[in-house]
Image: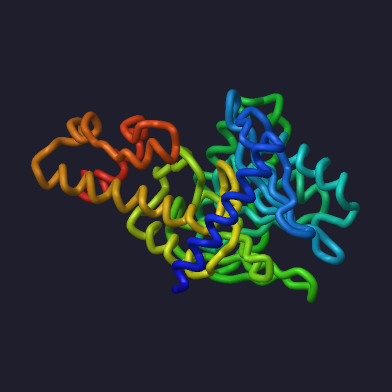
């Protein structure tokens, strides 16, 4: 019965989003756009084509301060701060990094310059200290105009599994469910509005990067996210959606793992799998053939066969 209610709600949400999106031009991929998901809750969908500008972001306006969800790249962080200032002059007190990747966290210093505290899950700490710093230093060489004079700013506040920010009017729960896209992925959950900012633990389209992932554990994390029963998924990349996006994201990993396991057990080599694997639903969802996601195929093959 609960699943039927979810399905009906999801369909209704899709219809509302679809009509609003068609009217507003939301589905133009070459633009970054900002949407008000609820009073005081904002979602910025990042431009992905023809230029990738980083992750989607969000911010929540509390009574006396603002929480930003995902710092993005430094230049994008500057743009977001300007957008927030169009809405409110309340201080930005927190910037929450859903994980360590540069397109989600390299702009931290832009917020700490404003007096904010950068926050992340405890499990992401070692990744900021190593891969995060290495990626930032690489960007300093490759993008000196944006990164050259900047100092890497890792989170100053880590939480083990849950951190609640609640002022009596607005409540955001920062939650860690386990190893998904990275070992330290966390999400921002607004229980009153039933809005979930999922970071890259759930994306909408061909944006999955598995290099830091554990896809078996990732499926379990998606199950835990679904148990929250969110009404809106503000994904780390791609369009906003309803709860059905979690099932779609999970289906990709379940079917990808099953297909690779079956072919590998049947004697096919990794190269043969990459050439012949077929998941029709994936192309319907993302617009690209699953074969083009070679890195993901290689990663899952390694997980299953240790090669």
Q: Residue furthest right?
A: 89
**Can you tell which quarter of the image residue 270 is in?**
top left
Q: State which quarter of the image contains the C terminus.
A: top left
Is residue 76 depicted above or below 123 in this figure? above
Residue 250, image x, y percentages: 39, 54
Residue in the picture at 63% in, 33% down:
47
Q: Is residue 218 visible?
A: yes
Q: Nearer the viewer, residue 111 or 45?
A: 45
For residue 258, side relative to residue 53 (left or right): left
Q: Nearer the viewer, residue 166 or 87?
A: 87
Q: State which quarter of the image contains the N terminus.
A: bottom left
Is residue 146 depicted above or below 86 in this figure? above
Residue 149, image x, y percentages: 73, 32
Residue in the picture at 71% in, 54% down:
37
Q: Nearer the viewer, residue 22 or 127?
A: 22
Is residue 9 depicted above or below 265 in this figure? below
**Can you tell which quarter of the image residue 188 is in?**
bottom right
Residue 48, image x, y percentages: 59, 32
Image colouring? rainbow
Q: Residue furthest bottom?
A: 168
Residue 294, image x, y percentages: 33, 33
Is residue 132 depicted above or below 222 in this figure? above
Please give the count of numbered marks on the rendered protein: 0
Q: Is residue 152 visible?
A: no
Residue in the picture at 48% in, 56% down:
244
For residue 259, side relative to residue 240 (left or right): left
**Can you tell which quarter of the image residue 101 is in?**
top right
For residue 21, side relative to residue 11 (left or right): right
């Amino acid at each position: 019965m609960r699943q039927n209610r979810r399905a009906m709600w999801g369909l209704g949400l899709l219809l509302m989003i679809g009509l609003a999106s068609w009217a507003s031009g939301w589905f133009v991929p070459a633009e970054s756009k900002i949407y008000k998901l609820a009073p005081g809750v904002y979602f910025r969908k990042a431009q992905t084509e023809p230029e990738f500008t980083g992750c989607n972001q969000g911010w929540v306006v509390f009574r006396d301060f603002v929480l930003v969800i995902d710092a993005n790249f430094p230049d994008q962080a500057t743009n977001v701060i300007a957008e927030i200032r169009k809405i409110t002059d309340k201080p930005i007190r927190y910037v929450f990094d859903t994980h360590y990747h540069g397109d989600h966290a390299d702009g931290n210093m832009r917020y700490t310059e404003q007096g904010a505290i950068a926050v992340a899950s405890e499990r992401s700490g070692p990744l900021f200290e190593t891969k995060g710093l290495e990626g930032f230093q690489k960007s300093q060489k490759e993008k000196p105009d944006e990164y050259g004079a900047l100092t890497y700013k890792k989170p100053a506040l880590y939480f083990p599994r849950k951190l609640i920010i609640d002022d009596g009017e607005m409540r955001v729960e920062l939650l860690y469910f386990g190893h998904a896209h990275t070992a330290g992925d966390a999400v921002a959950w607004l229980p009153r509005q039933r809005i979930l900012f999922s970071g890259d633990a759930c994306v909408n389209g061909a944006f999955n990067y598995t290099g830091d992932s554990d896809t078996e554990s990732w499926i379990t994390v998606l199950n835990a996210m679904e148990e929250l029963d969110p009404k809106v998924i503000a994904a780390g990349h791609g369009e906003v959606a309803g709860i059905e996006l979690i099932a779609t994201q999970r289906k990709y990993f379940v079917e990808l793992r099953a297909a690779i396991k079956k072919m590998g057990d049947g004697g096919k080599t990794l190269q043969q799998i990459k050439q012949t694997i077929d998941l029709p639903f994936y192309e319907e969802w993302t617009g690209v053939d699953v074969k083009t996601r070679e890195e993901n195929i290689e990663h899952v093959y390694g997980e299953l066969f240790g090669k």
